[in-house]
Image (tube, rainbow, N blue to C red):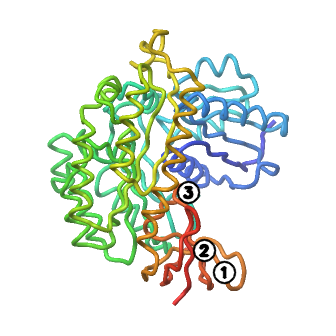
């Protein structure tokens, strides 16, 4: 029996997954489908994450929960987990009416039509373009722009190349067109994302580079974006430290719309562990990069991630990481415990029992890093107290108060600024920062 052309998307995972979910929704809506809530939808798409074991379990649990709640609806397992384990999921998960990988998003309309008759597995290997005129699931006034898909770094612990495939950069023209589209809709913050922004354009051949006005590196791409007229923020998320282009620092000084906010996942500091992870840099080299950034841009904000519990990590290795944390003094830091991912080089190390770090030890190390970081973040955030800046309004909580973000607060991960005063969601409002409350700020409208 045909089901109604209504759908709902449950997105799990990172910002890159969110851009995929937005693309799927846009493609369906272009074909006459209507986005609605799950209780009203004929089709439910769970856009899964397969990055680490915890994310896999969350994805499977979400599919099972939707099936229990809506036994008669069509449910699709999409995204990273479906791409990597498509055949296995189709066999072992009858709760899903379809399994749909993430390498050809444009095939979603064909999938939806096929579901009227049978269970479907669709996992094509060729890539599909993101629609430029897509809807935005982000917070008001803010949007994620995916600059590239896939990754060629092959860090030993990471399954992304197995899931997303090799690096495939979107053209500068395509990205600029997408930004112009959202500017016309009033968007004020553009968060440029990729598995590694620093690698953007490395996959371009000579012909592609010529069509892209020679844009074969991140700095060249940013120059083209900054040629676009308008009042907006441009934020860079996820740059591999070994691929950080120093030219970006000069661009930040030349154009204040390019925020001096850098997300650099250093992962570790022990030379032994870095080499085992497939990283070439050293703690001293990484500290030199941090010093160069802050020397050039004293106002710069740095975010990083640490991975603890990697096979072979000793107490001495962890102590090196703690020293690095203190010296680097990141504004924001996320800590994660190692998860053995099938097919990655680190999985071989994980099989060697002598190298295994007990889960209890890894969790304790993660908690220690988080505890130390609280004091560092509060101290670093104190330098913004008293300054006048613009905030991006996100949500009105009362007639005289709303939740906002300052330029040094990336969406979803860096806390919020409570503004005393009202402002329409999605607009920039001038304010003075009064004080810091934990990871959040408090400000007054001026």
- Looking at the image, residue 231 lies above or below residue 320: below
Q: Residues within 10 Å of mark 3 (few under 14, many from 20)?
A: few
Residue 308 in picture, x, y percent from top left: 47, 32
Quadrant where the N terminus sits is: top right
Q: How many numbered tags mark residues here?
A: 3
The reply to whether residue 150 is in sight is no
State which mark lies toward you, 3 or 2.
Answer: 2
Residue 138 in picture, x, y percent from top left: 56, 60
Q: Residue at x 65, y 33 (%)?
A: 77
Q: Which mark, by number, is residue 412?
A: 3
Judged left or right of residue 317, residue 79 is right
**Residue highlighted by disc 1:** 401
Residue 384 placement: quadrant:
bottom left
Which element is circle 1 on?
A: strand
- Looking at the image, residue 75 lies above or below residue 230: above
Residue 295 in picture, x, y percent from top left: 22, 62
Contact (CB < 8 A) between labels 3 and 1? no
- Give 433 or 214, whichever is nearer the viewer: 433
Contact (CB < 8 A) between labels 2 and 1? yes
Q: Residues within 10 Å of mark 2 (few under 14, many from 20)?
A: many
Residue 349 in picture, x, y percent from top left: 42, 14
Judged left or right of residue 402, residue 23 is left
Which element is circle 3 on?
A: loop
């Amino acid at each position: 029996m045909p089901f109604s052309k209504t759908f709902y998307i449950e997105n799990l995972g990172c910002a890159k997954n969110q851009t995929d979910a937005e693309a799927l929704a846009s493609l369906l809506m272009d074909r006459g489908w209507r986005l609605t809530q799950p209780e009203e939808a004929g089709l439910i798409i769970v856009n899964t994450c397969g990055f680490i074991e915890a994310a896999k379990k969350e994805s499977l649990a979400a599919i099972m929960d939707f099936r229990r709640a809506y036994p008669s609806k069509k449910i699709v397992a999409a995204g990273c987990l479906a791409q990597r384990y498509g055949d296995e999921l189709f066999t072992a998960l009858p709760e899903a009416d379809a399994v749909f990988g993430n390498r050809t998003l444009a095939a979603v309309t064909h999938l939806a039509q096929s579901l009227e008759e049978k269970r479907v597995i669709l996992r094509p290997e060729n890539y599909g373009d993101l629609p430029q005129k897509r809807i935005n699931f982000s917070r008001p006034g803010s949007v994620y722009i995916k600059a590239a898909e896939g990754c060629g770094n092959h860090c030993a612990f990471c399954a992304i190349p197995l899931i997303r495939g090799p690096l495939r950069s979107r053209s500068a023209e395509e990205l600029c067109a997408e930004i112009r589209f959202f500017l016309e809709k009033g968007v004020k913050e553009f968060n440029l994302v990729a598995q590694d922004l620093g690698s953007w354009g490395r996959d371009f051949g000579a012909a592609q580079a010529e069509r892209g006005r020679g844009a074969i590196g991140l700095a060249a791409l940013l120059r083209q974006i900054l040629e676009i007229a308008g009042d907006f923020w441009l934020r860079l998320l996820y740059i591999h430290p070994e691929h950080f282009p120093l030219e970006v620092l000069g661009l930040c000084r030349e154009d204040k719309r390019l925020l001096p906010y850098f997300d650099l996942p250093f992962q570790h500091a022990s030379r032994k562990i870095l080499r085992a992870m497939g990283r070439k840099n050293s703690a001293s080299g990484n500290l030199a990069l941090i010093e160069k950034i802050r020397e050039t841009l004293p106002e710069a904000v740095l975010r990083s991630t640490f991975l603890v519990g990697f096979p072979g990590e000793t107490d001495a290795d962890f102590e090196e990481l703690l020293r690095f944390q203190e010296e680097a003094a990141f504004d924001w830091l996320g800590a994660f415990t190692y998860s053995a991912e099938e097919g990655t080089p680190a999985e071989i190390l994980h099989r060697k029992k002598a190298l295994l770090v007990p889960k209890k030890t890894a969790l304790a190390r993660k908690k220690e890093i988080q505890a130390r970081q609280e004091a560092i973040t509060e101290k670093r955030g104190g330098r913004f107290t008293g300054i006048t800046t613009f905030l991006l309004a996100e949500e009105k909580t009362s007639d005289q108060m709303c939740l906002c973000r300052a330029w040094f607060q990336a969406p979803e991960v860096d806390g919020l600024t409570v503004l005393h005063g009202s402002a329409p969601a999605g607009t920039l409002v001038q304010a003075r920062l009064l004080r810091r409350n934990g990871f959040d700020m408090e400000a007054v409208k001026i």
